[in-house]
Image (cartoon, rainbow, N blue to C red):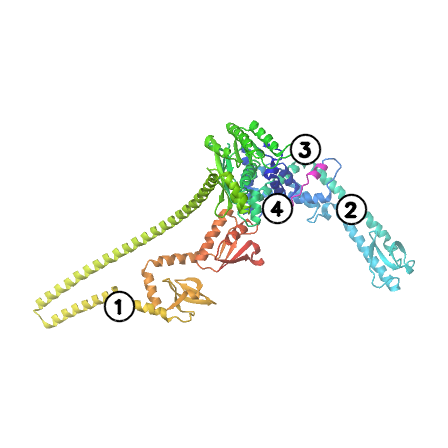
Amino acid sequence: MIYPKDFEQKIGFDSIRAKLKNNCLCSLGESYVDKIRFNKDFDLIDKLLTQVNEFTEILQFSDNFPSQDYYDLTDELSRIRIEGTILELEALFDLRSSLITIVDILAFFKKSEAEKYFELKVLAESVVLDKSILKRISVIVDAKGKIKDGASKKLKEIRSDLIKKQSQIDRKINQTLKQVKSEGWAATDVEPTLRNNRLVIPVLAAHKRKLKGFIHDESSTGQTVYIEPTEVFDTNNEIRELENAEKREIIRILIEFTNFLRPQLEDIKSAYRFMGLMDFIRAKAKFAIEIRAQKPVLLDKQIINWVDTRHPLLFISHKAQKKEVIPLNLQLNNAQRILIISGPNAGGKSVCLKTVGLTQSMIQCGLLPALDESSEAGIFESIFIDIGDEQSLENDLSTYSSHLLNIKFFTLNCNAKTLFLIDEFGTGTEPQLGGAIAEAALERLNENEAFGVITTHYSNLKLLADTQAGIVNGAMLFDTVNMQPLYQLKIGNPGSSFAFEIARNIGFPKIVLKRAENKTGKNQLNFDQQLQQLEVEKLALNKKQEEFNVADSFLTELVTKYEGLVKEVEDTKQNILTTAKNEALELLNSSNRLIENTIKEIKEAQADKEKTKAARERIRQTSDAIKKKEVKTNIPAAKAKPAEDKVEKNFAIDSLIAEGDFVQIKDQDTIGEVVDIHGDEAVISFNSIKFRTPIEKLRKVSEKQAKQEAKLTKRSGYSTIINELNDKMTKFSLSIDLRGKRADEALSDVRRYVDEAILLSVKEVNILHGKGDGILREISREYLDTIDQVENYQDQKPDRGGDGITVVTFK
């Protein structure tokens, strides 16, 4: 149960009903909105929330769910249950349109994947609709709501005769009019006209007796009379008879169809109830998307473990003003069942209270709440609330008396399955006495093991959390430096009212505040201020800790990469040294063998001059080969230094940069070739990677230095990075398709895509989000607003996708 009777008005649920009705497409859906009731059946609540959750997927990821021709014909169907009544032509056309919508809805679920939309498919399976109904209707009426000629054989004959008769009349009238004009009985510019639904000829009054026929009317001046010639009089009568026959035949057709329809009325009405239910669930899903609602983890017990909860109406209001809503994190369980919220006035205490009441009511009414999907939500059998001014002149109740009646009801009816909400507990009377009654009532509610949230300024209630198990304090934080509320709930410690600080901030007379401080005592003021400042500093410290953890993680990653590179360099160094040692040993062994063989040959030749000369030549050639190898594999220190000096000189040859020049980005080692120049920017190619950068950031280098740098680049591990960038550029697409993705998934993809575009210096990209309900378009553009490198974004041209594609231009 809910208490009091105006519970919905107090928490704002009536406003949510109004928004749901605005989302409905027909009165059938609106009637379901009126039937929303608070319930405590866990299975039913879970089913209702799942239905809405499934429909949010349809609205976000499907463009072909029927959304038009939702007509409520239940009253008309009830009327034709009586024998002798007929379905009017307009109603028949609406019946055709709405039955097509119902059939399309059923077809949508039938064609969808087997594992999707389970609960909605259960509703669709209960619909029984004879397809021959639509076939019969399509024979009778056309797409414009007119009775077809072929609705019956007789109707076709009647209309054929009508066309022939009308043609005869037109021919005779034109002949007569031609004669009248030639005789001068009428003006030369007159044309046949209608009077009493019959074709007549305008004739000057002076000549009215010269044309035989029936006078139907005359002009306001009396100078012109309208005559139906005798030649067409009988034919016109025949047309009237044919028209009456046509009406009778149409009525007969409608009677016949109504008789055909009457036995199936219950099935048809059931199909219309299904359509209304789809409209209702669709309205709830649209509202859920608007407030960014999620389905929480639903538990069949009394618990509140909400993460990032927002007041839905406040969220909509702030969103329109481009303001942010501070989310609420709240935990109520068996260990802490009652939360006492204290803090400054206008600090958000009452909003917290209403958020709890409205969110829990939405859940138990089958509406998705505005919280994170990791939240846990329980089920309560009753929700009681005491908020606002309950003064009643009719019942002779003061504000405090009405509050006392509510608290009396709470203490008598609360139990372990009740959630109670009390705003400004104990106020309205003498503080000491009101505080004592509030404390005693709160103790009683705690003994009843009820769950609840109260707001108060009374210190005796704040102290209960230290003596009563199950009660916990919470504070609405206040920034004592900037003198403004933070609208953040911190559970664990009580909050200060900051009455003096707020009074001082609004310009309250200093002399009055000074007297008040003397009466209150400095110690009390300093204690409250220090307590709240500690909480603010603790939050700031926690935020710094989070930033430190992120930085530490990033630094750890960099260190790991650095250590990996160092190890790779050491391994390469060892490989080079090992190879060099092996080559040196091989060279030494080869030289030793050569010398030994030479000595042996000289001895054997007994110092023959020619053979000795040949042996020396072989030694000289081997020596030259070794020296050449040393030159290739070693760079003398004496020659290295001038090369370095030359590199420095290469930067001194700066002049106007043109296409084909080799340039280096200042403060970087990368050298590339200028392939194009646009104004103050140059397009540089490096290892097939092209990127755009301002010319002022470049300095020209010589072609020789560029070639040397290219050789060094190939030898170094830097080529790995280039290859990675090259791979990224090769795979990068100038458009991303978000259609068919969830909002959170799409946002993640957009972030990653924009980061890569900025990294690769891409100038313009397209984000394909489709049209639908505009959810993906909205979240994409909200994110783009936060990126400094985005110069602008706009809709694509109409012939290329229009507002279904966002074109993003980077700076």
Front residue (pair 738, 505): 505
Front residue (pair 156, 499): 499
Residues marked 4 and 1 touching at CB (< 8 Å) = no
Q: Residue at x 70, y 36 (%)?
A: 78
Q: Earlier in the sequence, mark 1 or mark 3?
A: 3
Q: Residues within 10 Å of mark 1 (few under 14, many from 20)?
A: few
Q: Is residue 73 magenta?
A: yes
- Report the span colored magenta: 67-79
Q: Nearer the viewer, mark 3 or mark 4?
A: 3
Q: Nearer the viewer, mark 4 or mark 1?
A: 1
Q: Which residue is mark 1?
A: 639
In this rendering, the answer to whether 616 lies above or below 725 is below
Q: Earlier in the sequence, mark 2 or mark 4?
A: 4
Q: Residues within 10 Å of mark 3 (few under 14, many from 20)?
A: few
Q: Which residue is mark 3?
A: 394
Q: Specify the amino acid type for callout 2.
A: Glu
Res. 259 visible in picture: yes
Q: Which residue is mark 2?
A: 246
Front residue (pair 300, 172): 300
